[in-house]
Amino acid sequence: MENLDVVVVGGSAGGLSAALTARRHYPKKNVTLIRKENRAMIPCGIPYIFGTLEGPEKNLMPDEVFEKNNIRLIVGEVETLNTGGKKISMGDGQEIVYDRLILATGSDPLLPPIPGMDKENVFPVKKDLPYLRSVLETVNQAKDLVILGCGFIGVEFADECRKNRDINVTVVEMLDQCLKVAFGEEACRCCQEIEEALIQNGVNVITGTKLTEVLGNEKVTGVKLSNGKELKADAVIVGIGVKPNIKLAKEAGLDIDRIGIVVDSNMRTSDPYIFACGDCASKVSFFTGEPCGLKLASIASQEARIAGANLFGTRRKNQGVVGVFTTMVNNITVGCAGMSEKWANENGYEVVSGEAEAPDRHPGSMPGMSKLWVRLVFNKINGELVGGSVRGGSSAGELINTISACIQNRMTADDIAIFQIGTHPAITASPGAYQLINAAEIALKTIKTG
Amino acid sequence: MENLDVVVVGGSAGGLSAALTARRHYPKKNVTLIRKENRAMIPCGIPYIFGTLEGPEKNLMPDEVFEKNNIRLIVGEVETLNTGGKKISMGDGQEIVYDRLILATGSDPLLPPIPGMDKENVFPVKKDLPYLRSVLETVNQAKDLVILGCGFIGVEFADECRKNRDINVTVVEMLDQCLKVAFGEEACRCCQEIEEALIQNGVNVITGTKLTEVLGNEKVTGVKLSNGKELKADAVIVGIGVKPNIKLAKEAGLDIDRIGIVVDSNMRTSDPYIFACGDCASKVSFFTGEPCGLKLASIASQEARIAGANLFGTRRKNQGVVGVFTTMVNNITVGCAGMSEKWANENGYEVVSGEAEAPDRHPGSMPGMSKLWVRLVFNKINGELVGGSVRGGSSAGELINTISACIQNRMTADDIAIFQIGTHPAITASPGAYQLINAAEIALKTIKTG
């Protein structure tokens, strides 16, 4: 029996950030992280081990961080949680008494209720090194690969799996475009350009179609589609989403809702000594305050920095999920933040939008130029920014974070129109053509008349 | 005699943005822009016409914008302004009565009080096409070029002038490092890395040294330095700053202070029908409210969007200058926003800072990785962000704008620590290693103890 100050369960983005934050904010407390994996994967890097990175060993979280920050690492599985005794029991019988506990138990991949999902070589995306090694070996030998779902995971797996391989990659998406949930109708050019990039790279993209059955005896040999067609497949990768891993919390009697472990704005669960963060924790929308199902490593990390700082006294409040996404195919970067117009309308918002496109250099003849497109969505009632999409070169990846800063600070279209930016010929649009500002000005046209 | 609704004097970044903003906000008014140049140069692009762009013709402001936005362009010089009659007189005798006037008359380059500055082939940086063409011709034939001043203009001219030429380029700076005023002591690694990049590119960098005399008879043949040494030179480019062009306003009796034409927070001058913006207008600091001498195209453009929107009723308020800079040499991007620690201390701020460095990809083995370094400066009293510096690859150019958004919204270190970002393996650091957030967390260590 050990007595520990701060114990974090889970070693992915949420768990690691929680432990680091606890260490930073409570230097006199001991901090322990327990994870079940011998080595932890960088979650967002997983698609890239199939192409760019050449293997899962290149995508490991750096364990030096534990020693460097005086965080104890225990590899093992927590089997039970006794909230009354503030005690956890490990698989090997070890018992630990905690003063504060952070649950960052993450999520498991969802499998759709389709016949044949249990066949060999059907792979949900698990964040597990030996498992991913075996998926890579199978993909390396496959002739026909089907990827189910063309959200961010599907796009990235499709593009990476076709790299350096003689393989036929097909991605099947039930919506009419890839990435459609995140970008919505108004930013469908982002979806379209990414789809075109995939096709240009040799990926078969089938949209507006469901997968109805996985074919084969023990091993998958093909898939059946809702249009009646069949595709050959010797491997299927499933990237349709995740479900929270709440077993430990549920068995311990913590409150659970349909999103995950219930937490307040301090990230505290129904037990005052237990916090939760990341994919396992319930969330609300920044905009509506309603439950929100988004699960991203960046959200996990952000919630962890709230939980870790609040362990022995409230310091930070969670304002709810904004939702910021980016991906890149063939150097086309797309990103979105906040509400799409469709989602805003469905949630009772009256919105106006503005878009602007210009070279991301000035003059446009400067080398390395990409066209950068920005679309902003504003609450029509108070003028506040509630969403944005970008499409451009690699700088678009940071621009979407500028947009996120504007959303989180509830900046209005007028505020953004007079936003003080730095511009440079070799790096950005000109001050006059700066896309973020012009998109706000153009939206204002709809809000007011002169 | 013509009667016009809105007249803008000046066709650079401020004038053009002011005209476009007036057009957007007052669709029923006619908008006229008067500039003295036949074609206007993109101001920030001027250094690049000496290398990357191969000539001043490649760096022109696009004049299609006038017709496209129904803005009338008059090329000519305004000679007098009669505020009582709301009237301007042109060089050709034409008289125009305005309803609202925006002065965006810009600035002229400063020449230091050094003997010999009037010699042939000593070039202050004027934003003038035929003039720049002649400077380019001289540089093309020069064997030894001296650049006076190693701020942003000096750095960019030095790097561009040595490109594709058999020329000996020397830059002379009186401070101990290039870019020192903007970056301050704490971000001197930005200065140092840019200096090293210049040296690596074959530029001679002489710091801590003044230029005391320009040598030669009619034409420059060399320069004399404060350390007694002499340098050969058949051309000298002077990039030490600019002075406001306030002649028209002053002669018309508008209030002037030591920075420029006095304006209120609406960008209105002492005459209620006349606005001013950009290099010719006085400014105050966002932080202290004190007069501020910064002159940048991005500031001009921002002030223009305030002036243009406020012409017939106040819509926007100027909060004062934050100051956001970026430049790039050899794909090293450096940027800064807000106050340096030195400047903050000199203005009575007690500040704390934090810095973080990490790869701008995750894992770090993703292709195209640069190390990205961020330093943030916080007001120790209330925790608000007052400054920041970055050094990295091209994405640093947009990151400094995210930092500017945080400054303008007076975000605290805790706010930034839980800032909701989007991250992606191919585009940014990991959520846990995201430099902006970690720099805030590290600064908090100094602000509090656990």
Image: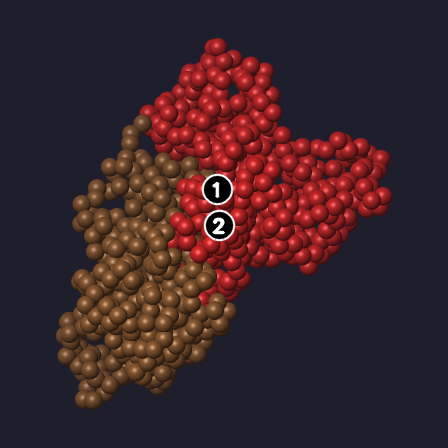
Chain colours: A red, B brown
The C terminus of chain A: image quadrant:
bottom left
**CB under 8 Å between callouts 2 and 1?**
no
Where residue A69 appears, as percent x and y from the top left, is 39, 34
Amino acid at pointer 1: Ile
Q: Residue at x 18, y 49 (%)?
A: B346
Q: Residue at x 57, y 36 (%)?
A: A347
- Residue A324 coordinates in the image, percent (x, y): 52, 43
**Residue placed farthest to the bottom in the image?**
B218
Subunit ID for the residue under disc 2: A
Q: Please provide percent x and percent y for residue A270.
A: 49, 18
The crowding category of the residue bearing disc 2, from other C-alpha atoms within 10 Å (few below 14, some 14 to 19, many at least 20), is: some
Determine which residue is flagged by label 1: A381
Name the foreground residue: B161 vs A281: A281
Query: B14 or B374: nearer the eye?
Result: B14
Query: How many dots with numbers?
Result: 2
Q: Position of residue A140 (x, y in %)?
A: 71, 47
Q: Nearer the viewer, residue A75 or B385?
A: B385
Which amino acid lies under the numbered mark 2 shown in the image of this protein? Ile
Can residue B7 be seen? yes
CA gap, disc 2 to disc 1? Answer: 9 Å
Q: Residue at x 22, y 72 (%)?
A: B247
Q: Is residue A285 rendered to the left or right of residue B186?
A: right
Image quadrant in which you'd find residue A417: bottom left
Residue B141, relative to residue B353: is it above or below?
below
User: Are tags 2 and 1 found on a single chain?
Assistant: yes
* Residue where numbered disc 2 is placed: A447
Q: Residues within 10 Å of mark 1 (few under 14, many from 20)?
A: few
Residue B392 visible? The answer is no
Chain of the residue where label 1 is placed in the rendered structure = A
Q: Which mark is residue A320?
A: none
Mark 2: secondary structure: helix
